[in-house]
Image (spheres, coloured by chain):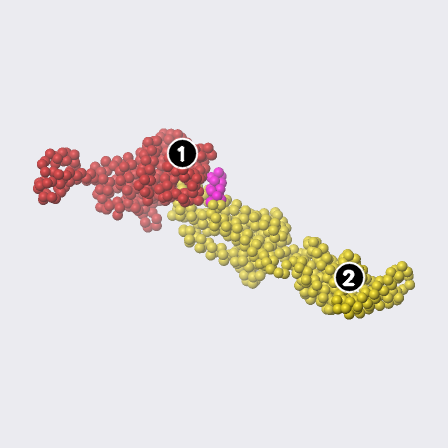
Chain colours: A red, B yellow
Amino acid sequence: MRGAVWWGLGRYAERVLTLRDVHKSYGSTVAVDGLSLHIEAGEVFGLLGPNGAGKSTTIGMAVGLLRPDRGSVELAGLGSPTKASVRRHLGACPQQIALYEQFSGEENLLFLGKLHGLDRATRKRRAAELLERVGLTARARDRVSAYSGGMQRRLNIAAALVHDPQLVLLDEPTAGVDPHSRHALFELVRALKSEGRTVVYTTHYMEEAQRLCDRVGVIDQGRVLALGTVDELIAAHGGQSVVTVLRDGPGGGAEEGEPERIETDDPMREIARVAAEPGAREVRLERPDLEGVFLHLTGRSLRD
Amino acid sequence: MRAVLALALKDLLLLRRDRAGAFFTLVFPVAFAVLFGLIFSGTTGTPTGVRVLVVDEDGSAASAAFMERLTRNESLRIEVIGDAQVGAGAVRRGQRAAMLVLPAGFGESVSSPTRLFGGGGGDEGLVRGVVDPGQRFTTGLLQGAVTAALFETVSGAMGEAEGVRRAAADGRAMVASAEPGTINLPMRLALRGVFDQLDVMASEMEAAHARGDGGDAPSGDGTGAGPGSGFGNGLGVRFEEVAVARSGPRSSFDLTIPQGNAWGLMACVIGFGMSLVTERTRGTMTRLLVAPVSSSQVLAGKAVACFATACFVQTVLILVGVAFFGVRVGSVGLLAAGFVAASFAFTGIMMTLSAVGRTEGGSEGFGRAVLLVLALFGGGGVPLAFMPEWMRQVAGVSPFKWAILAVENAVWRGASAAEAVVPLVALAGFGVAGFVLGVWLFRRSLRR
């Protein structure tokens, strides 16, 4: 099936998923307001925005759970994901832990495999592979209710992969997990990318987007504010780097003992210059990041 | 279809893992039916045994003594009534196992050998009995009990020496006055020997009484009228069978088993309805809906699981009733149709209920409130027959009434085909309405 999906998607375009001018409202509340973007084959695409920005609604439309009020969503070459046959080609991991707690980890995966039409042997093989992959082989027969939060998160992602999809959508997969599980999830996303899968990853943690994503869409109030690689976004919206210099004596325009802040587009050259001057005791570099990008674009912090 | 079955199996497995849910769905209805069946049948305390009506048309000391002796028999539950016709009606309706009538002259018969041995009871017998032919074992039990009581009564009547002498004198007078040729010589000699023996026995009783050791009733050897002789063959009681009209329940379990079904159906509705709400609140519905299955398939899976469980619960209950509590199924076909119709109806109701509430607490509270009222109005608590007329009229809006009626029709009501169709059609109507409304509400909730 993996091959079929790959060929099916690859034959038509490098754009695996396209959302065109989609709108979605809940009563008078506008959740998504004319959002357009495309996801390219093999990339990890991050949808970055604060809580309530419209990320989950966008994912909901992308996986066919929600119908847009206006606009269109298309899985390349296959049509709208509101059709059950189209959804067969994507794997979605909801933000909420969506598992049957009375079932074991293995039973959850076997049931979902059955729902995706996998035969018995394939189901068992995939379940074993995925449990191994997320480090739950030893707890495979335990009920999910006995798992820790981090283990449930890992299984939640494994459940999205049981049918070996080429496009995987992860909605805030690290919400509320411990650092160990978070690291394991990062490794899993990297592994998915290395296997050539396309990953859409929503988060409100700019560090995650910066570490994992090839491209990032910054979203707020249901609209995409900026789209590009991390470097492109920072270059365009992050502002200048700041070199902070602490000297032994007065110099550089600052009072004695006070740090000097230098904003620059070429921090390395500035650091070399400062280092060549006498009296520089400490030099610090603050590069712009996606937090700065969001602040620049909205005037608010991501965590507001 | 594979996806629907996978979803249904998943729900059945979840029910099995949920101990509280399984208890209320499978165990509670059986416990309800058994407990209330026992309470209403009175078998949790004394007296126990076959329920027998007795009509005392004689009103003599002997008849009172006979009834008192009959009451001592622990196999019988004796109820004295005044009207034989009313009693026969109760037997005919299956409300009582048998009736005994002590006709006028019963007392004289038991104290007179002439009437006792000479056919004084005639073809009527000393005691007349009316029995339900469906309970033939009762006839044997009753015959033995009546014979024993009669023997004791006759013995008691002749228990005093004076009575024995009077019986011997009556006997001699009967033989003497008999028309020539009616009693041959050997018989006359034999009877004379019997009467002489009675005189001897009376003398022995007087002597024993004088010694202070009693003077009780003579043994059977002395009279030739022991249980092994004439009475033992049922000489004194003649039974007739009446055709029992099955217009009433045979036992309280005929009522409580269908009621237990209703509670089982209610547990199914609440259990599966809540599971659908839980799927939404816990996020597993999202997981299902991003899989390659439609919302209709998700609903169908839930409906199949609910329907199968409802059929299973009802089948278990009736099997328990048949195996342990004497419930007899009049029509297996009608019973199966009733189960299917009731399961369909309550599956439809489950669909609506699950789509109404947005939270588990809200849905469960609403569901229990509505279903409890419907169950009580529909005869799930107090049988409809015991309700005021206006409540019986209102009960038509309750699917529980029709579910109970459908089972009762198959078990004891002996309904005609036309009568049996009514609850089935009503249940089908509830089912269709529930499905349509439930699917509409569910899809509307997904669009939100």
Q: Residue at x 8, y 42 (%)?
A: A250
Relative vertical location of residue B259 with respect to residue B156 in this rendering, above or below: above
Asked if residue B207 shows in the view, the reply is yes
The kind of residue tagged 1 is: Glu
Residue ID for mark 1: A129
**Chain of the residue that carries numbered disc 1 in the rendered image:** A
Q: Position of residue B55 (x, y in %)?
A: 70, 64
The magenta stretch spans which residues?
B1-14
**Badge 1, how many Cα within 10 Å: few under 14, some, many 20+?**
some
Q: Are marks 2 and 1 in contact (CB under 8 Å)?
A: no
Asked if residue B291 shows in the view, the reply is no
Residue ID for mark 2: B219
Q: Position of residue B275 (x, y in %)?
A: 45, 48
Q: Is residue B6 magenta?
A: yes
The Cα–Cα distance between marks 2 and 1, rounded to whole angstroms, is 92 Å
Instruction: Kindly state the secondary structure of the residue where label 2 is placed.
Output: loop
Quarter of the image holding residue A184?
Answer: top left
**Badge 2, how many Cα within 10 Å: few under 14, some, many 20+?**
few
Q: Nearer the viewer, mark 2 or mark 1?
A: 2
**Chain of the residue that carries numbered disc 2 in the rendered image:** B
Instruction: Kindly state the secondary structure of the residue where label 1 is placed.
Output: helix
Q: Is B159 on the left-hand or right-hand side of B330?
A: right
Q: Position of residue A259 (x, y in %)?
A: 13, 42
Q: Is residue A264 magenta?
A: no
Q: Main secondary structure of the magenta part?
A: helix
Q: Is B6 on the left-hand or right-hand side of A191?
A: right
Quarter of the image holding residue A251?
Answer: top left
Q: Residue at x 78, y 63 (%)?
A: B218
The kind of residue tagged 2 is: Ser
